[in-house]
Amino acid sequence: MDSYPGDFPFGIMDVVELLHLRIRRRQANSVYVDCPFCGDRRGKMNVNFVKNVWRCNYCDEHGGMLALYARLNNTTTSDAYWEIGEALCNDFHRERPNSGYEMAGNQQAGTGSPVSGTQTDLAGYERRGELKTVQQAERASGQEIHQTLSLLLAMLPLQPAHRNHLHSPKRGLSDEQIDRIGFKSTPPPFLCRSITERLMKQGCKVEGVPGFYLDDSGRWTMNFYRKNAGILIPAVGYDGMIHGLQILLDSPLKQKDDPPDKSGAKYIWFSSSSKNMGVTSGSPVHFIGNPSARVVYVIEGLLKADISHCLTNRTFAAIAGANNTSQLDTLFALLAQNGTEEIIEAHDMDKYSNQMTSNGASKIYLMARKNGMACRRLTWNPNYKGFDDWQLALREKEQREKEVQRMNFKQQYLCGKCDFTYIDGCVELWL
């Protein structure tokens, strides 16, 4: 583990406590807190207390523990070190060490590199019952993850209620499209062990696959519960393999102290990052369509990409959040090599009113230009938030117009589908 010239007498969780950041969720090696930079109150900032780093998944602000304190208090990382130390440590004295902290602090402390004092700090937190580190598995290979998740989906049905939801006007998918994409329903919790055992007997590796973990009895199982029941959405990469699963929840997840009118999380990843020998999902990029397409659309939301592809037959790359763009760089490099000439950013229309969405859209533009491709922003009728909403509305309008054209005058008149000019024309013909 990397270390600074002198061990820090505190860790990033001390900084979180000192800044009074609200902890929303706890994971194996990190916690999620409300972001003090963008003001989001859904616990989008991840604070990794093993690496002493933080990043907001909404606004993409990130850094190390000294940078967190320094930026919120408008000071330098060097002064942040001494201010944190004086606030937390009774025996901390403002004496500059001869080893040259000024250079080490200013050059490294803001980057978030792990420090050698981290484990000691964590031990103190664990004694107070505030944190508990959990051993994580090494991530399986892409081929192993694909094999396991593919066979898992093959074992699961799609419940009628979920199929009806995908059929509904809000989603607009046909049975053929639903089956081709591979949507399935999450299994009931009591089947998780037996399904996992079946996967292992068929030669699938579950260790290191997102969503699988060792339970308290030492048996492999899956991280499905009543609270995360819903529709499984495969995240298929550019290589055609399944790299993860997202869940469209039946009941949005809300924090216990959220106001009644606040909507909860509708989508979560099938992950086991908070479990023993589990692993994070990694938020992979979803790709659907022609890998050699001249034009590729980038959109926020896996299901949104699937629906948009089915409606337009165009190629889409989907990210799970407007600012989760880091993995797009690798994808763009592959697309450019394979003949793609233009990237079209198709984020929701709130990109014109939401600064975070706008920032994410700008990153897409810069990445496309970096990889030698043109990029432009797609806009549409602002009455429809998403590209899929807009396309569904256009399809519904087209279907209504075709139905009217098949009607005779009497049917149109009784249904209120003809205007006065049309009535006048018909009267003139009769006369």
Image: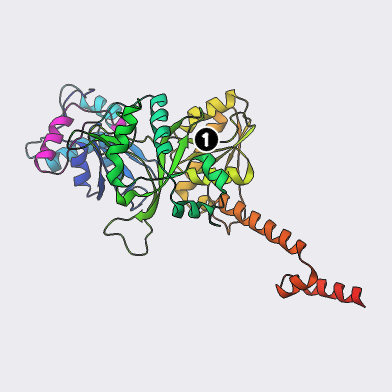
Query: 174 or 419: which is nearer to us?
Result: 174
* Residue at image location 31% in from the left, 51% down from the top: 227
Up-down relation of residue 54 to residue 140 (above or below): below
* Residue at image location 49% in from the left, 55% down from the top: 164
Report whether residue 273 is seen.
no
Up-down relation of residue 315 to residue 430 (above or below): above
Locate residue 163 relative to residue 311 in the image: left or right: left
Q: Report the magenta residues as a range.
A: 110-135
Quarter of image, res 63: top left
Q: Provide residue 324's location: percent of width, then percent of height.
A: 43, 39
Residue type at tag 1: Phe
- Mark 1, secondary structure of its residue: strand
Q: Is residue 113 magenta?
A: yes
Locate residue 406 relative to residue 46 in the image: left or right: right
* Residue at image location 59% in from the left, 44% down from the top: 310
Q: Provide residue 328's location: percent of width, then percent of height.
A: 49, 33
